[in-house]
Image (cartoon, grey):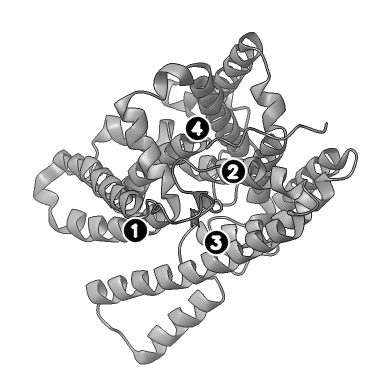
Amino acid sequence: MKPTLQSSSREQRLDFWRGLCLIDMVLVHLYYESKVQFGDFLGRLLGDYTRFAAGGFIFVSGLSIGVIFWPRAQDDRKRKSTYKKLLRRSVYILFINYISGMVLISIDLLQNGMGSFTHILSRLRDLFFLREGGDLLPFYVLMIAVSPIVMQALRFKWGWLGVLVSSISLFVWGLWHPWAFSPAQDPRFPPVLWQAIFILGLLLGFAWPKYNAISFKWKATLTGVCWLTAGILFIMEYGYQWGMQWVSFGTAFTKVPLSTPETLRYLSIIFGIITTTDLCWARVSSLAPSAFVQTLGKKSLPVYVVHLWIIQLATFLAARWTFMGNWQLLFAPVAILILWLFALILDVTSQPKKSMPATASIPGIFGPEPMPGTAR
């Protein structure tokens, strides 16, 4: 299983999928973190039934590493510099996590009072040791740091199989020891479990040229299998709401710690989104909504960080503007629009000048993101 090098053109689909994950993340965080009133039906629809952001973000991050960096790692002349870029990216995200965490602590202190000096120091200590901070960011620090090791293993014959078996084995062991290798006992993304989704995404990126070469018929078949699986898992998880308790077969869909059924649910939905988008990309890519979503995805790291701050503001407003009732749903389009404007400003201001080399790049949450129109 040794795929050929991919095309050098920018992979707009990655931007699109990242943007979709950001939008879903905003909706889920507004509903669960900010306690924004969506109403019973929309709350269940957006907060439970259609949520995919956590697993989707992690899968697409691994996919992006595979699509962008693996072809470079195959070149003997670029391999060392590619691995160094990934390690620098990990350190950069660690720095961003510290900055984001300090801003979040500051916002919390402004809302709830300064408290004691000892309390502030303890929170800063927890931030330093990755017990507190930017939600997904500590997980990315670890996974991007180990990506060079994974890619080095992929260089060997059947290396992809060894990586796959190792990842699944670690996941299975983690079902009994979910907090192993975690900085605290209550993180949302214990790496021993969530690494499996990241690694599966990276392996898809490794095989990306082969996936792109699959015929329309087989992609349609994959799409059908994904959505059929997602539908079965949906009934198993929520069938009790319609008097079908028996369909769950005693399975547990839990995010913290991540369970096997929940993992399969994330994977079936995000891969279903990927294959469905792929089938109609020729039409979808030219539409205005697609451009809107891609703008968010191009600047995923800064948009992700700012969204954490917006969620804090929404939490403050939702608790005080209860008179709005279900009209608090308007927080969602406003938040998404603010993030899009922020991403658009970043995109416009980061356009390369004519004197800049074509390879100039800017940071992104899943790796360096080339300037529009440059090779990726």
Left or right, residue 108 beside residue 118: left
User: Which amino acid type corresponds to the residue marked 4 in the rendered image?
Assistant: Arg
Three-letter amino acid code of the residue under disc 3: Pro
Q: Quadrant of residue 112?
A: bottom left
Choose the circle earlier in sequence order: 3 or 4.
Answer: 4
Label 2: few (<14), some (14–19) or many (≥20) C-alpha neighbours in 10 Å: many
Q: Marks 3 and 2: which is nearer the front?
A: 2
Residue highlighted by disc 2: 64
Disc nearer the start of the sequence (1/2): 2
Q: Is residue 230 above or below residue 215?
A: below
Q: Residue type at mark 2? A: Ser
Q: Secondary structure at mark 4?
A: helix
The secondary element bearing badge 3 is classed as loop
Query: Tags 1 and 2 in contact by the CB under 8 Å rule?
Result: no
Which SS class for mark 1? helix
Q: Nearer the viewer, residue 181 or 280?
A: 280
The amino acid marked with disc number 1 is: Val
How far across and how far down the image is residue 2, in percent?
Answer: 82, 33
* Marks 4 and 1, how far apart at CA: 23 Å
Q: Position of residue 176 (x, y in %)?
A: 73, 52
First-in-chain label (4 vs 1): 4
Residue shown at the point (58%, 69%) measured from the top left: 91
Query: What residue would you read off at disc 1?
Result: 306
Total labels: the figure holds 4
Residue 309 % position (x, y): 31, 61
| Disc 4: which residue | 13
Point out the image quarter for the N terminus: top right
Left or right: where 300 falls relative to 339: right
Mark 3 or mark 2: which comes first in sequence? Answer: 2
